[in-house]
Image (tube, helix red, strand yellow):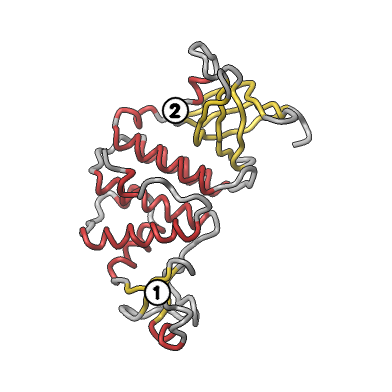
Amino acid sequence: MSSSLYQTTGIVLSRRDHKEVDRGYAVFTRELGKIEFLARGGHKPLAKLTPHLETAAELNLLIVRGRVFQTVAGVDRIRAFSNIYNNLSLTLLTQNALHLVDIGTRPEEQDEGIYDLLLDWLEFLNKGFELPSERSAYLLGSFTLKLLALVGYLPELYNCLGCEQSIAQGEYRWHSLKGGVVCQSCVRKDEQQWFSARPMKDETLKLLRFALKKPFEEQLKLHLPGTILLDFHDCIESLIISHFPTIPANSLRAACIH
């Protein structure tokens, strides 16, 4: 990090225009976590580096560290995920997941787990599945749960947040602010502490566990009852509102409608 020039491998999370002709990028890297830099002249139609930075891909980057801004000096594409952009639902899933990583991480906090999650996600979507909006929203929920776990907000789905004992079927409630399930006994003992805990169906808890632990491809054939899916999304949305540093503009369900 002492050198003014360094190489890293990353995936572009977001872009923004900077002044009249430059463009700023946020990239999640394996070595350094999220970094931000400028592409000088990146807003010009004939900019050489910009095309490599505009679509979902794994990139080799050459970065120059300046006094105020970092700038990109070179880009090589390692892997492209071109099949994603042949399908609107896959494009939306990609963009929304990248946005969640962008708003849920801080610059230069290394986490290879998040990088691997992004790669798994892109490789999965690049297989070109046809996904209805309902399935897309569920998969984005699964991605969000896995991301929450990696950034330090792993929800407790097995043991009581209060007494730490295994929860019994039908004998627990959901508490989003504290991040998980609490048994009915603890709720009764201290109603003031757990006053915002709400009922949860066993089927919803099973779906949360499945979405958190299983690979994305295993979740394609899972039956998704409508009422349980609504509860599933409500639980994840409540975790985002309670714990994410920035709340997304759209809900997970709304983000997948096209």
Q: Residue furthest bottom?
A: 189
Residue drawn at x 56%, y 39% is 28
Q: CA distance from mark 2 to mark 1?
A: 42 Å
> Mark 2: which secondary structure?
loop
* Amino acid on which the number 2 mark rests in the picture: Thr
Residue drawn at x 28%, y 49% is 220
* Amino acid on which the number 1 mark rests in the picture: Ala
- Give the class, few, some or many, for how many residues have Cα within 10 Å of label 2's Cα (few <14, many ≥20): some
Residue drawn at x 25%, y 41% is 131
189 or 137, which lies in front? 189
- Give the class, few, some or many, for how many residues have Cα within 10 Å of label 1's Cα (few <14, many ≥20): many
Q: Which mark is residue 64?
A: none
Q: Which mark is residue 197?
A: 1
Q: Residue furthest front?
A: 19
Instruction: Locate residue 246, reporting x and y percent.
Output: 50, 50
Relative height, residue 227 to residue 76 (above, below): below
Residue drawn at x 30%, y 45% is 136
Between discs 2 and 1, the one toward the N terminus = 2
Q: Which mark is residue 55?
A: 2
- Quarter of the figure with the N terminus: top right
* Lateral position of residue 152 relative to residue 143, left or right: right
**Label pair 2/1, CB-CB below 8 angstroms:** no
